[in-house]
Image (tube, helix red, strand yellow):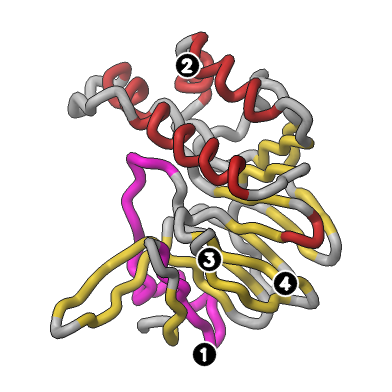
């Protein structure tokens, strides 16, 4: 399993190369910003046509992560669906696939700004979730401590052999952890963005995803 282990607020966590967060002590897997159904939402609203394969691709990667770790709890940190209509429009095969992934697990949907209304696709809908001293919510709050959030789709760049390589990234400091977007059709916000620099402390790190996750000082 490719991952980067790190301590956070008395917890030992692993940033997986896929962009998921694994908490072995609590048998908890956390993912953020799946944006399932984005191609359907674009078509419904008259936007650019996107190949309608992103939901299956995202679920394939999530299924692979769940096959690698013995997760008893799964936390989806909001914007799991691109909007409420996208949740309703999921094909029955994909709804069944989600139900299969949920089977035998405590599955938590955190509400996001794209999917603020509860979804009726199994699991539990919550505004936030607390476990073992950590709080899981969609959008970071000021002065939070032990907070795990998403929303911003952070990414960071590293120079390798004279080339700048940009990847989705976890942002980490002593008080908060912001997860990268997990969904296939999700863009990213560079860690140099003003909002991310204002949220993260001066000693923050970025953990770049990929085959070999690597931690670097957060580019600002």
Q: Residue at x 67, y 53 (%)?
A: 137
**Alpha carbon separation for disc pair 4 and 1:** 22 Å
Label disc, if present, on residue 202 of the rendered structure: 1
Q: Nearer the viewer, mark 4 or mark 1?
A: 4
Under circle 3, the secondary element is: strand
To which residue does mark 3 refer? Answer: 3
To which residue does mark 4 refer? Answer: 12
Q: Tag 3 or tag 1, which sits nearer the N-term?
A: 3
Q: Tag 4 or tag 3, which sits nearer the N-term?
A: 3
Residues 164 and 63: in front is 63
Q: Tag 4 or tag 2, which sits nearer the N-term?
A: 4
The image position of residue 43, as x and y in percent, is 27, 19
| Residue furthest out toward the left | 162
The residue range painted magenta reads 183-209
Local crowd at mark 1 within 10 Å, few (<14), some, or many (≥20)? few
**Alpha carbon separation for disc pair 1 and 2:** 42 Å
To which residue does mark 2 refer? Answer: 90
Q: Is residue 45 left or right of residue 118?
A: left
**Alpha carbon separation for disc pair 3 and 2:** 31 Å
Asked whether 196 falls inside the magenta stretch, the response is yes
Q: Tag 1 or tag 4, which sits nearer the N-term?
A: 4
């Amino acid at each position: 399993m490719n991952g980067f282990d790190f301590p956070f607020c008395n917890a030992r966590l692993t940033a997986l190369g896929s962009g998921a967060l694994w908490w072995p002590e609590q048998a908890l897997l956390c993912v953020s910003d799946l944006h399932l159904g984005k191609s359907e939402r674009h078509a419904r609203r008259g936007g650019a046509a996107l190949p309608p394969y992103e939901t299956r691709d995202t679920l394939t990667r999530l299924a692979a992560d769940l096959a690698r770790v013995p997760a008893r709890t799964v936390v989806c940190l909001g914007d799991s669906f691109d909007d409420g209509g996208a949740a309703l429009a999921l094909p029955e095969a994909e709804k069944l696939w989600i139900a299969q992934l949920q089977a035998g697990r405590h599955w938590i949907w955190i509400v996001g700004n794209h999917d603020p209304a509860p979804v009726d696709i199994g699991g539990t809908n919550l505004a936030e979730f607390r476990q073992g001293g950590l709080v899981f919510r969609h959008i970071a709050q000021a002065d939070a401590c032990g907070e795990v959030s998403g929303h911003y789709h952070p990414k960071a760049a590293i120079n390798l052999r004279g080339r700048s390589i940009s990847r989705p990234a976890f942002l980490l400091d002593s008080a908060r952890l912001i997860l990268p977007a997990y969904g296939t059709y999700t863009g990213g916000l560079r860690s140099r963005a003003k909002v991310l620099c204002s949220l993260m402390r001066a000693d923050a790190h970025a953990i770049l995803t990929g085959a070999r996750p690597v931690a670097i000082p957060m580019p600002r």
